[in-house]
Amino acid sequence: MPPTTTSLPRRAARLSGALLAGALLLGGLTTVPAAAGTSATAATSAVRVNQVGYLPDGPKRATVVTTATQALGWQLRNASGTVVASGSTVPRGADAPSGQSTQVADFSSHRATGTGYVLTVDGSSSAPFDIRADLYDTLRSDSMAFFHHQRSGITIDASLVGSAHARPAGHLGVAPNKGDTAVPCQAGVCDYTRDVRGGWYDAGDHGKYVVNGGLSTWLVVNSFERAARAGKEAALGDSTLRVPERGNGVPDVLDEARWELDFLMRMQVPDGKPYAGMAFHKIHDAAWTGMPTRPEQDPQPRELHRPSTAATLNLAAAAAQCARVFRPYDSAYADRCLSAARRAWTAAQANPALYAPDSDSTGGGAYGDTRVTDEFYWAAAELYAATGESAYRDAVTSSSWHTSADAFSPYGFGWADTAALGRLVLATVPTGLPAADTARIRSSVTAAADGYLSRMAAQGYAVPVPADGYFWGSNGEVANDAVVMAVAGELTGDARYRAGALETMDYLLGRNALGMSYVTGYGETSAQNQHHRFWAHQLDASLPHPPAGSLAGGPNSGLQDPVAQERLRGCAPAACYVDHIDSYSTNEVAVNWNAPLAWLAAYAAERTSTGGEPPAAACAVTYAVDNVWSTGFTATVTVRNTGPTAVDGWQLAWSYAGGQSVTSAWNATVTQNGTAVSARDTGWNRTIAPGATVSFGVQGTHTGSTPSPTAFTLNASACA
C-alpha cells in the first residue's frame, strides 16, 4: 500500500531530528523508547556494521555511536579471537538524520577472507560478520525470489519455496475469491469485464497496480541488462532462480518479469472501447481486507479503476524495454510487447492528462500523480531505444526533462518520479543520439552519483538520502540511489561509485541508526514482522514470517500509521521505524522496494576478477545488430578483457564483408578505410579491467545486407 500523496519529495513529512548528547546512544529516539521488543531501539551494540559482511575488495566501514570527541582505537578479531587489524576511528560528531553522535572505523585494507569477524571499539563489540567474495550470492536469489512469492494467479509450490510459504493460487475466480478472471470496472468507468489474472501483488495487500508494476518490472529487467553489459548475465540465466519456468532456455529473471508483463498487457483497454490502448490504473478489492487474509481466502469483490496516463506510460516503457531485451529469447513475445507499447504511447498522447485521483484509496493505494511529463520522457526513451524511430527520438529531445537539471532528484527516482529512468536508458543503450547529447546525459548520471557520494561522506552512516528524505519507502529510495551510483561506475570505470553502491548495502544490512538489518533473514538482528496479509506470523502463529530477502520499507519520519504514531514519537528521521506488522508506513514490503534491492544484490554479487588460469585469448568480442532499416543499421560492439591484466588504452579492428559504411558512433572514435574499420577508446573508457567489458555503438548504411564481422583484433592481437 503506497502513501496517499503524489511524488516522493511531496509525500515526505518533514521532521527535524533533535541532536542527542551526553551518553552512549544505542537507538535513535529523542524521547523515552517504547516497550522492549517493538521499539526502534533494536541495536544492542554501539558498533554498527553490515551484519552479513563485506567483500574482500570492497569498502569496510563501521559506524560507532558515542559521545566521545577524541579518536577511539578499534580492533578487528577473527573467529578465534585473534586481532588481525587495528587502527583509530575518525570522529564525525553530530549526525542529524540519526540524532546520534558518531565516529567511523575504516578497516578496508583488511582483505583476508573468513567468517565470524568482530569489530571492537572502546569496549563495545559488533555483531559477527564475514568477509568473502560470495557474500551476496544467496541474497541475489532470495531478493529476486520475492517476486515469485508475490505472484497472483498461480500456486506457490512447496518444492520451490518450502512448505511454510507455499499456498494455493490466489484470485483465479475460485470461491471465495471474486477475481481476477472477469473483473468489472468501478461504477461509471466501463460496462465490460476483463481477465486480469496474474501479475504480482504489489505489497502487503492484494492490489495490483500498473504504475508500481511498470517501474518494478523495468528494474528487474534492467538488472539483467546491466549484467549482460558486464558479461555476467549467466548468474541471472536459466535455472538460476526458484521459479516454475526454470529450464526453458530463457533467463529466469526474464521469466519472472514476464509474469508481471503479461498482467500489465492484460490491463490495456481493448480496441473498440473508450480509451482504447490506455491502461487501467489498478485492480484491487472494493474494500480493505482484514489482517491476516491469505490471497485465496480474500472474499472481497474486485474492481478495475479508471485508466490513467501515468499507468499507460508505465506500460509503454516496460513493454518497449521488453521488446529489446526479450528479442534474443522469444521474438514473437518481443513483437507483442512492442505492439502494446506503441498502442499505449499513442493512447497516452491522445489522453495526456488523465490523472488518477489521490482520493481513490479505498481498498487499495491511490498512486495518484498529476505530473506525467516525466513518464512521457521515460516511455519515449525506451521506445526510441527499441525502434530507433525519429518520432520517438523527437519526443525525447523535445521533452523538458531531456535537459532539465532536476531529472535526478535529491530524493531519488520512484513511481512518481521517472525522468531518471529515461536518462539511464539513454546513457546505457546505444541509440542514434548525437555523441555530444549522449555524453551530456552520461554526465548527468555521474553528477547525480557525485551528489549521493557527497551526501554519504557528510553523514555518520554514509546514507545517500538527505535528512528530510526518510519518508514512506525510504529503503527503496536508498537502493534506487545505489542503482544510479552503480551505473555511474559502469560508465566511468571510477571505483568510487562501486564503493558507494556497496556502502548502501551496508546501511540496509545493519550499519544504520537502529543497528538492524532491514532484510529478513540477513544479519544477527533483522526485520521479521513486515506488514503482509499472508506472512503474518506476529498475528497468527500458523502463518510464516516473510521469506528471506524481503526488504522492509524503512524509516518514515511522517509516522503515517497508528503504531508508529504511538511508539515512535520524537524519533530522529533515520530511526522512525518499528518492526511491527501493523506499522504499514515503516514496515510494509513492496515490489518497487525489493526490485532495486534485487538489482543491487546481483551487482554486488559479481566477482571483479575472473580468477583461475587465464584463457588462451585475451579478449572476446560480441557484435550485435540492434536495428536494420531499408538503407541503414545500428549495432553494438562489446569487448571483454579475458586476460589477467587490465587493458589501458585500446583499438579494436575488424572488416565489413557486406559493403556496410559507418556514418557515426558513440563511446568510441571510429574510422573506416574501405572495408577496414578501426575503433579507439574515448579516454573515459580507456581502461578495461580483467573480466570487464566496454561497449560502443555504430550507425551506418548498407546496400542490402548487414552480415556481422567474424574476426576482430584488440591492439593488434586476435580476439575470440
Image (cartoon, rainbow, N blue to C red):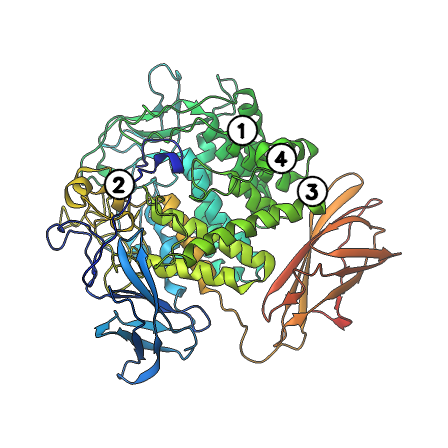
| Dot label at residue 651 | none
Provide the residue designation for mark 1. Answer: 344
Query: Label 3 to label 2, Cα distance in Å?
Result: 42 Å
69 vs 476, left or right, is left
Question: On the rendered image, what quadrant is the N terminus found in?
Answer: top left
Query: Label 2 to label 1, Cα distance in Å?
Result: 32 Å
Question: Is there CB contact under 8 Å for labels 4 and 3?
Answer: yes
Q: Residue furthest front?
A: 69
Question: Is there CB contact under 8 Å for labels 2 and 1?
Answer: no
207 vs 536, left or right, is right
Where disc 3 sits, the SS reads: loop
Residue 347 drawn at (x, y percent): 54, 24
Residue 30 visible at all: yes
Residue 617 drawn at (x, y percent): 68, 74
Which mark is in front, 2 or 1? 2
686 vs 534, nearest the viewer: 686
Q: Amino acid at mark 2?
A: Ser
Q: Amino acid at mark 4?
A: Val
Provide the residue designation for mark 3. Answer: 433
